[in-house]
Image (tube, grey):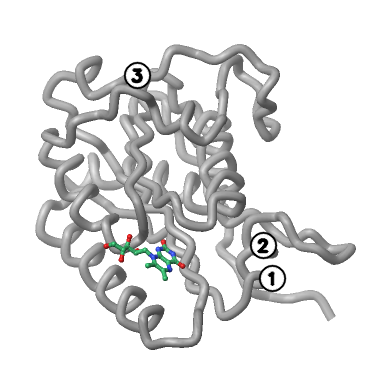
Amino acid sequence: MSSIKGPSSAQFDGSSLRIAIVHARWNKTVIESLVAGAINKLKACGVKDSNIIVQSVPGSFELPFACSKMIAGSYVQAATSSRDLLGLNFGGSSTSLPSNKEPSAPTPTLADMPNAPFDAVVAIGVLIKGSTMHFEYICDSVSHALMRIQIDTGVPVIFGVLTALTEDQALERAGLGRGADKGHNHGEDWGLAAVEMGTQSKRWA
Ligand code: DLZ
């Protein structure tokens, strides 16, 4: 029997939105796919490439700090863009998963967005349970901190943190499953959620 789980879709126009993606670098293969899925969906909803800022941090534990600084407009973009660090080149308007062969578009930095008031921030991380309590502490603290940031700042923070018990769970949620069913890339859902919440938060302002 097919699953009934998942969001019902609604269409929002992202053409006037500025979106920040902050991602951890732990579990790179899964992260790459999730970030690509989110960017592709943002662009499919009309968000301009020049209005998508991507910033990386070491691990998921660092996501709340970086999100909060991005919202404050004071996080310094690394000299090398995270898209390049990941080998992700998002040139062109293709909505398919990016290939490293596509020409690299100049990656916008915060300097290109003075007073960058992001309409939404997508926090992306992949936590995979190990043999200690580390996983539980990070999942708990990061999810609470991200919730607090969006409530305190009024800027929607999309919870793009996979809290997987196994590597296979993480791969399947990034569309990279090892079986016949590759699974669904949740990054796409996060991109959609960012456009909806960014649009709605303008109306609720
Ligand atoms: C240390 C650590 C471990 C063991 N596992 C993960 C993980 O599965 N996913 C992730 O995003 N980060 C992990 N980290 C790194 C922490 O998030 C953090 O970067 C370090 O503890 C430094 O603060």
198 versus 100 height, above or below: below
Residue bearing mark 3: 108
Q: Residue at x 23, y 57 (%)?
A: 64
Sequence-earlier tag: 3 or 1: 3
Q: Is residue 95 left or right of residue 105?
A: right
User: Residue 181 location in percent, x, y?
Assistant: 84, 63
| 3 vs 1, front mark | 1
Quadrant of ligand 1 in image = bottom left
User: Residue 90 location in percent, x, y?
Assistant: 56, 23
Q: Residue at x 50, y 80 (%)?
A: 130
Crowding near pointer 2: few (<14 within 10 Å), some, many (20+)? many
Q: CA distance from mark 2 to mark 3?
A: 29 Å
Residue 108 image-quadrant placement: top left
Residue bearing mark 2: 171
User: Residue 7 location in percent, x, y?
Assistant: 56, 63
Marks 1/2 in contact by CB < 8 Å: the verdict is yes
Which three-letter amino acid code belongs to the residue tagged 1? Asp
Which of these two is toward me, 147 or 64?
64
Sequence-earlier tag: 2 or 3: 3
Residue 63 image-quadrant placement: bottom left
Residue bearing mark 1: 168
Q: Residue at x 70, y 32 (%)?
A: 96
